[in-house]
Image: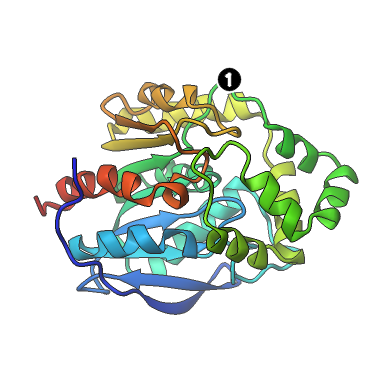
Amino acid sequence: MPIPSQISWPLRQGHLSACGIQTRVLQGGADLKATEAVVFVHGNPGSCADWRYLMEQTAPLGRVIAMDMPGFGQADKPDEYPYSVEGGATFLGEALRQLGVLKAHLVLHDFGGPWGLMWAAMNPLSVGSITLINTGVLKNYRWHFMARVWRTPVLGELQMALTNRIGFKAVMRIGNPRGLPDEFLNRMYDEMDAGTRRAILRLYRATSDLQEKGELLSRMLKPHGFRALVIWGAADPYISVAHAKQQRETFPGAEVVTLPQSGHFPFADDPMGVAKALIPFMQKQLGTT
């Protein structure tokens, strides 16, 4: 299905403070005070800048929002912050409250999945729909190699200290048949300063019991029958494409779209392919068909 003919809208950048964290916020749309919004939540090691193209394409349909999560992008990265699924979900909820969002259509990627889904499970009446991009409720999931390194004390710190721009780009290109744009990789590396590297280690070490948490999250989410879209880069080396259809166990009516030549960051290696799935879905959710 082609992307509907529309003009992409410029985004406005601002800031907010939630849970003691000052962070960057991107917004777009005709009404920046609308209480219903499409909310994009990045993962590791991303930032709200990951979503610029998709936000510009979605903004003609309604209000769009993305922010840097604590420890990432241009957000504060304090040593004492609780970098965890629960901490991220709490921050997201407070940020949306400050932005006046009463109904959120979540678009989630990577660790944005656990953050956003935990918030959704605790605030089901505030959820309009859920879009999962290479993330979701993960059952029978085993940590990928880099995650196991980050979860190991000393080894994780050593890996972070030794990672330079060349090595970062080489690792990020694994499992991406289409390749990733240099601009995307350079921006991501530039934002991954010492504070972000520390936050990543804390986040992965605070996240355990994946099977138990996945089952609990599924039981909490499934009864609400959320409208859902799943978009998955099939070459993802971190979260197997087998988990794409698995999302229907939690979201039975979910539409599943796989992109065979994309990896873990399909919005970067095939932004138009992602938009072709996302825009028609959002048109239906926002009543703009």
Q: How is the image coloured?
A: rainbow
> Which residue lies under the disc numbered 1?
140
Residue 100: % across, % down: 32, 69
Q: Quadrant of the N terminus?
A: top left
Side of 68 where 153 appears, left or right: right
Q: Residue at 52% across / 38% down in the picture? A: 177
Q: Type of residue at label 1?
A: Asn
Q: Residue at 30% across / 49% down in the picture? A: 275
Q: Residues within 10 Å of mark 1 (few under 14, many from 20)?
A: few
Foreground residue, 24 or 189?
189
Up/down of 3 relative to 100, above or below:
above
Up/down of 265 relative to 242, above or below:
below
Q: Quadrant of residue 31?
A: bottom left
Side of 260 where 151 appears, left or right: right
Give SS at disc 1. loop
Side of 8 where 259 appears, left or right: right
Residue 128: % across, % down: 26, 48
Q: How many marks?
A: 1
